[in-house]
Image (cartoon, grey):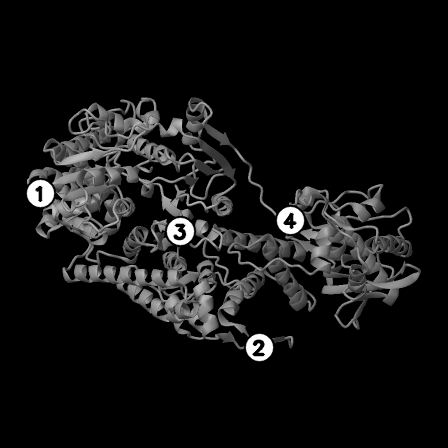
């Protein structure tokens, strides 16, 4: 029998069949419902039920007070502090007000004498202020207005406590702890001497507060109350077991005995050590996997039960030590699981609506203000792109876009490309990234969004001192999303919307009441700002959840640890049995220091008592269960609650409970494996390769004969043929992303564009280049290529100043070089090479885009600009051909080799080098020596750096061309060799910045 079955039978036997004058007080409302069901089963005829109440309901009802809502309570406390200290700032107040109210609640529940506590606390803070422990030689700390206000807070706590009690009493209101204290202090008149309370049973309690103890003691002594406990000798008789701490204290007080002190009313069953149990302890990598494992185990139990005759009716509970796992658990249950009861609310924080509202607040919080470009002292607020794109990609916003058929009409580009229409919000998000708009104004968003009402609502600025504007915006948002909710027909999300609307109404009413009362901050501004309004709203959201309506007698119950009080189950799955979660980590948000709270004179509970309470709930839950599964995570969770360490409760079961059970308890540690049944091995990513099929070879041939073989293509193939396959054959590209800080590639492209303009618009035309011109072109190209980049501060400002310094120094050195003539800029040199493949000739295009072609004295120089590091060998290596064919680290040598080859080949074919794209203007260069090299901006003073590649002693142009073409033919043949698959590189360091390392498992 379960505990509540035993209790129901006992009470029915003592008082049945008429129980109208009996009161049964239980820990939770869920326990009340189960108790009444069990009681009803004891008679086949109707009878008057007892007054069965959860303890909180019993206390507030008996005390005759109305509980105040949390928002109104915070404002009442603020008014109290304003009377004590008119300079108190609301935003600072709201930061610690909830903690203080929690302390007041505990003080009252444990009947702490407030004068003694607050005097103690004030004296302790005075000692801190005195710095009595500081060594004489140390410099004393200077007290600031902030520290003075901090210490003044503790001096005012007693006055605030008394004033708050007075304000609430005058209105007939109370907070929870205040109601407990009022009942405890007036229990004689309110309950003991009240004829309505003839017989009271307190059932299934463990850790009573001082107020509860006083109420119960008075009623027990008056022989009007009786306690029915649920305990087990395992933790009750072993003084080392923390689960029995409170019960042992009550036993010492004689509370575990019946009213005649003869019969022990505790059911004398040895459930933990005397009944058979199968306990499985399962570790999984993360929290969400726990839900999947729980769903799988419950499905197995269901299938086992259905095969029995008659089918099993075992009661099962899935218990969530971390209640945020409710949604994953519900989704993890099999679709045929319809008979379940969820004894916990679904938090509003779990809704899509909350993610939308949270992103809105975060965007408003991170608004940046910029000066106008005309130098006026006017600052323009701009939204950060990350939050803008996040809002545009929100599921509700996308649904709104689809329902209203919002589209960008498309356009024809300057190159004649026809861009088709596409969804408006998706186009805006792509445009923001494409144009690198890091910050956007409200006006810009309206222009991009075609002045759509949702865009107008989402991207309206909320001044911090106007919380009512935020409320109006949220109302407008709810109104605009009605069509989305009608379309989705999601009952839970619709309930979320109703709850959120109700919270807004509650806050609006409170704010209006404060405005009417003239409540202002110390600076004369409104007391409540958008920032503090958000704190209020989020506190309400934290406290608000959707209650599930379902059948209480369902075979499956999903609940939190506290909801399990007084309930029993045959099969149990407990999630998050990790140290730091079960029990919780040793921290308590309180203004009362631990040593003061733990002082026996004060008697406030600390984390020690919390751990004892959780230990009792855990072991009591195991008492009557036959199948137990304990799930824990083996890695740190996102909130840092768990360090991947199993709970101490698991260790206690392994080393204390199981050895004493004499074989009745079996414990196992099964391993969870994920994947398709029958698949024993995961593909070995280290051997990942792609064979060259005929289709792939055809694509490769098409690439070589049309686009051609550029130095960058060849370098990529030699460095990592798999990377070449992904980018050149399959055409996989990394999704374009937004970077606020200039990357190395963007920095280099910016300087390249400036250098190209200097050469094309000035040096090729023999026009002078000076410092102001360089600065001007840097500004123009930055505005053109960087668009939304901000250079007012931070790394971008440093990079801008660095670029300016490097460019000025480079142009100064260029002007000092006598005999330097720019021949061409951004020219593509090309040639065609015949390569024998399978008995047929393949004409391969060899090409390279040259940053600059210049003549210095009698030498032609093929120049490439490098903003990165340049390391060149001083002489030609002995194994030159092997390095060019196979060494992925020699990309710069390979690039210079091809540049020199292309220049010499063009001079050989047409007598010079082309100066324009049409290749009609040829610069005569026949007979002139050719070198290829770099201008490195890492070492501006180093000048032109060449790395002459020589195949032998004969370095004549004809021989160089012949040797190069022999090597190129070998390279092309290797690329087309069907026996050579595309493989990952063995040089792991090259994978660090590769776009495809995720695909390769690197």
In percent of the image, x 73 and y 54: which residue is there? 724
N-terminal of the pair, mark 3 or mark 1, is 1
Helix, strand or loop status at disc 3: strand
Return the x and y of residue 450 as percentages of the image width and height.
45, 75
Reading the image, the residue beneath label 1 is 190
Kindly report the distance in space between the C-alpha atoms of the residues bearing marks 2 and 4: 36 Å
> Which quadrant of the figure contains the C terminus?
top right
Question: Where residue 1000 sits in the image (x, y, percent)?
Answer: 67, 48
Q: Which residue is mark 2?
A: 411
In the displayed structure image, the side of residue 911 where residue 571 appears, left or right: left
Q: Residue under circle 4?
A: 997
Question: SS of the residue at dot 2?
Answer: strand
Mark 1 or 4 closer to N-term? Answer: 1
Left or right, residue 811 beside residue 846: left
Front residue of this view, candidates 350 and 643: 350
From what the image shows, is residue 750 above or below residue 28?
below
């Amino acid at each position: 029998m379960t505990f509540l079955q035993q209790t129901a039978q006992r009470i029915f036997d003592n008082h049945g069949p008429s129980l109208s004058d009996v009161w049964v007080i239980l820990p939770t409302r869920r326990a009340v419902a189960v108790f009444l069901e069990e009681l009803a089963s004891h008679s086949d005829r109707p009878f008057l039920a007892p007054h069965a109440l959860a303890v909180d309901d019993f206390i507030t009802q008996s005390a005759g007070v109305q509980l105040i809502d949390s928002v109104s309570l915070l404002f009442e406390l603020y008014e109290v502090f304003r009377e004590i200290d008119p300079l108190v700032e609301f935003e600072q107040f709201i930061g610690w007000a909830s903690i203080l109210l929690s302390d007041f609640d505990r003080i009252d529940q444990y009947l702490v004498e407030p004068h003694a506590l607050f005097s103690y606390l004030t004296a302790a803070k005075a000692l801190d202020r005195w710095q009595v422990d500081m060594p004489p030689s140390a410099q004393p700390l200077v007290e600031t207005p902030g520290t003075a206000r901090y210490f003044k807070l503790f001096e005012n706590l007693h006055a605030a406590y008394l004033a708050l009690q007075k304000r609430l009493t005058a209105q007939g209101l109370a907070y929870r702890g205040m109601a407990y204290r009022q009942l405890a202090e007036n229990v004689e008149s309110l309950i003991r001497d009240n004829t309505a309370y003839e017989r009271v049973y307190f059932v299934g309690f463990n850790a009573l507060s001082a107020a509860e103890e006083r109420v119960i003691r008075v009623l027990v002594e008056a022989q009007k109350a009786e306690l029915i406990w649920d305990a087990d000798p395992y933790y009750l008789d072993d003084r080392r077991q923390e689960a029995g701490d409170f019960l042992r204290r009550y036993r010492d007080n004689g509370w575990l005995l019946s009213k005649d002190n003869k019969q022990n009313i505790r059911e004398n069953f040895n459930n933990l050590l005397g009944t058979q149990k199968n306990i499985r302890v399962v570790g999984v990598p993360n929290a969400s996997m726990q839900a999947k494992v729980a769903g799988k185990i419950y499905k197995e139990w269901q299938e086992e039960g259905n095969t029995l005759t008659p089918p099993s009716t075992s009661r099962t509970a899935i218990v969530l030590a971390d209640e945020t796992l409710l949604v994953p658990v519900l989704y993890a249950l099999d679709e045929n699981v319809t008979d379940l009861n969820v004894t916990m609310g679904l938090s509003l924080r779990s809704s899509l609506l909350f993610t939308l509202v949270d992103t809105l607040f975060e965007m408003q919080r991170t608004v940046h203000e910029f000066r106008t470009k005309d130098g006026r002292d006017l600052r323009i607020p701009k939204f950060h792109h990350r939050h803008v794109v996040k809002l545009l990609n929100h599921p509700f916003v996308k649904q709104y876009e689809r329902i209203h058929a919002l589209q960008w009409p498309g356009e024809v580009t300057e190159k004649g490309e026809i861009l088709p229409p596409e969804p408006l919000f998706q186009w805006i998000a792509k445009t923001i990234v494409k144009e690198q708009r890091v910050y956007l104004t409200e006006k810009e968003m309206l222009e991009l969004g075609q002045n759509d009402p949702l865009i107008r609502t989402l991207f309206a600025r909320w001044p911090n001192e106007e919380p009512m504007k935020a409320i109006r915006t949220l109302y407008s948002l709810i109104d605009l999303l009605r069509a989305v909710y009608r379309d989705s027909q999601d009952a839970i999300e619709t309930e979320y919307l109703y709850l959120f609307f109700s919270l807004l109404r509650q806050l609006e009413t409170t704010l209006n009441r404060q405005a009417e009362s003239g409540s202002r901050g110390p600076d004369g501004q409104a007391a409540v700002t958008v920032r503090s309004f958000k704190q209020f709203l989020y506190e309400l959201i934290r406290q608000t959840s959707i209650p599930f309506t379902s059948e209480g007698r369902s075979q499956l119950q999903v609940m939190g640890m506290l909801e399990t009080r007084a309930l029993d189950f045959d099969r149990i799955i407990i999630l998050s049995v990790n140290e730091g979660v079960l029990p919780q980590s040793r921290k308590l948000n309180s203004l009362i220091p631990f040593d003061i709270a733990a002082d026996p004179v004060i008697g406030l509970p600390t984390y020690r008592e919390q751990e004892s309470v959780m230990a009792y709930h855990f072991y009591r839950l195991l008492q009557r269960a036959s199948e137990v599964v304990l799930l824990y995570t083996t890695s740190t969770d996102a909130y840092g609650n768990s360090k991947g360490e199993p709970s101490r409760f698991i260790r206690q079961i392994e080393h204390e409970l199981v050895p004493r059970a004499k074989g009745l308890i079996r414990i196992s540690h099964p391993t969870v494996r994920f994947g398709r049944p029958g698949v024993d091995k995961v593909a070995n990513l280290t051997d990942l390769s792609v064979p060259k099929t005929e289709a792939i070879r055809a694509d490769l041939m098409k690439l070589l004969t049309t686009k051609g073989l550029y130095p960058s293509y060849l370098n990529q193939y030699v460095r990592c043929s798999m990377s070449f396959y992904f980018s050149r054959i399959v055409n996989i590209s990394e999704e374009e992303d937004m970077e606020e800080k200039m990357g190395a590639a963007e920095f280099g492209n910016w300087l390249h564009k400036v250098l190209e303009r200097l050469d094309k618009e000035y040096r090729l035309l023999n026009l002078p280049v000076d410092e102001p011109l360089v600065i001007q072109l840097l500004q123009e190209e930055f505005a053109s290529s960087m668009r939304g980049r901000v250079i007012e501060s931070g790394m971008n400002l440093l990079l801008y100043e660095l670029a300016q310094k490097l460019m000025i120094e480079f142009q100064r050195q260029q002007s000092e070089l006598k005999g330097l003539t720019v021949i061409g800029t951004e020219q593509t040199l090309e040639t065609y090479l015949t390569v024998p493949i399978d008995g047929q000739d393949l004409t391969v295009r060899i090409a390279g885009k040259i940053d600059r072609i210049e003549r210095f004295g009698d030498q032609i120089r093929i120049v490439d600009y490098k903003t990165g590091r340049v390391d060149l060998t001083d002489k030609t290596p002995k194994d030159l051909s092997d390095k060019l064919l196979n060494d992925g680290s020699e990309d710069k040598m390979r690039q210079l080799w091809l540049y020199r080859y292309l220049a010499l080949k063009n001079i050989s074919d047409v007598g010079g080098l082309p100066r324009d794209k049409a290749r009609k203007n040829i610069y005569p260069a026949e007979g002139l020596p050719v070198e290829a090299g770099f201008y490195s901006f890492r070492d501006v003073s180093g000048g032109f750096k060449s790395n002459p590649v020589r195949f032998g002693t004969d370095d004549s142009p004809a021989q160089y061309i012949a040797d190069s073409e022999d090597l190129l033919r070998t390279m092309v043949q290797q690329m087309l060799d069907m026996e050579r698959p595309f493989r990952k590189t063995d040089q792991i360091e090259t994978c660090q910045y590769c776009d495809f390392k995720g695909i390769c498992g690197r």
